[in-house]
Image: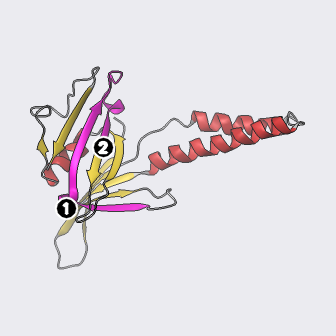
Amino acid sequence: MAEMVGIVSTAVEPGQPADNVMFFGGERRNMAMGVAMLGAGAAAFVSGLTHSFFAQAIAWTFIFWGLLFLYGDLLLNTRRFEARDDTLTVNIPMRLWNRKRVWAWQDINRVDVIIQGRDIRQDGVTVYVYHQFPGEVSLDREDRNYDPELVRLIIDRAKLRADATSKGIDLDNLPLGQNATFTWKK
C-alpha cells in the first residue's frame, strides 16, 4: 500500500495540550483513461476529422468524458482523512461542494470492510465508514480503499464492537480471494 500516512503534533494555543493528527492520503489512481479520451477528442479536431456534425459530437463527447474521468481521479487522489483526538475529518479540496466533513468519533456508528472474490490484494478491499449526526435520520457514508491502520484507529476511537463474523479478524491479514463482509457497530 503506497498511501501517505503522517503524524503531526500541533498546539492550538500556548496553554493547551498538543492535538495529535494522523493524515491518511488519497488513493493512487491511474489517469490513463481520462487522458486517452481527452487526447482522442482533441486529436480529432487537430487532425481535421470533424467535418460532419456527428464526428464533432463524438469528439466533444470524448473530451467531456475525458475531463470527467480526470476530475473523478483527482477527487480520489486529493482526498485526505485526518484523524484527530476528537474528530475524523474527510477533506476533499477538489470537490465543488461539501469539501470538508468533520465527524465526531461518538457519531461514527459503523465500519464495513468488504472483500469481493476477485480481491487478491489488500488495496482492492473497500472500507465503508458510516456516520450519523445526533437527531438526524440521514446516514453519511464515506468509501475508500482499505488501510488497516485507519480501520483500527476508527474502531478504537469510535468504540465500535465486532459483529459475530468479524470477531478475531486480523486487520493486517484479511482472508482475501473470497466474498466477505466484516462489520463493526456500536
Residue farthest right in this picture = 51
Tell me the element at label 2.
Answer: strand
Say whether marks 1 and 2 touch (CB < 8 Å).
no
Q: Is residue 78 left or right of residue 13?
A: right
User: Can you give x and y, in whole percent of width and height, for residue 11 in the image?
Assistant: 23, 71
User: Can you give x and y, in whole percent of width and height, for residue 82 in the image?
Assistant: 30, 56
User: Can you give x and y, in whole percent of width and height, for residue 105 in the image?
Assistant: 20, 58
Q: Nearer the viewer, residue 172 or 116?
A: 116
Q: Badge 1 local density, few (<14 within 10 Å), some, or many (20+)?
A: some
User: Total marks drawn?
Assistant: 2
Q: Badge 2 local density, few (<14 within 10 Å), some, or many (20+)?
A: some
Residue at x-position 22% and y-position 65%: 134
Query: What residue does disc 2 label?
Result: 128
Q: Nearer the viewer, residue 88 or 18?
A: 88
Disc 1 to disc 2, how far (Cα)? 21 Å
Q: Is residue 48 above or below residue 101?
A: above
Q: Is residue 4 visible?
A: no
Kind of residue at disc 2: Tyr
Instruction: Please tell me which of labels 1 and 2 falls first in the chain.
Output: 1
Tell me the element at label 1.
Answer: loop
Query: What residue does disc 1 label?
Result: 85
Segment colored magenta:
99-128
Could you tell me which quadrant the N terminus lies in? top left
Q: Is residue 53 left or right of residue 12?
A: right
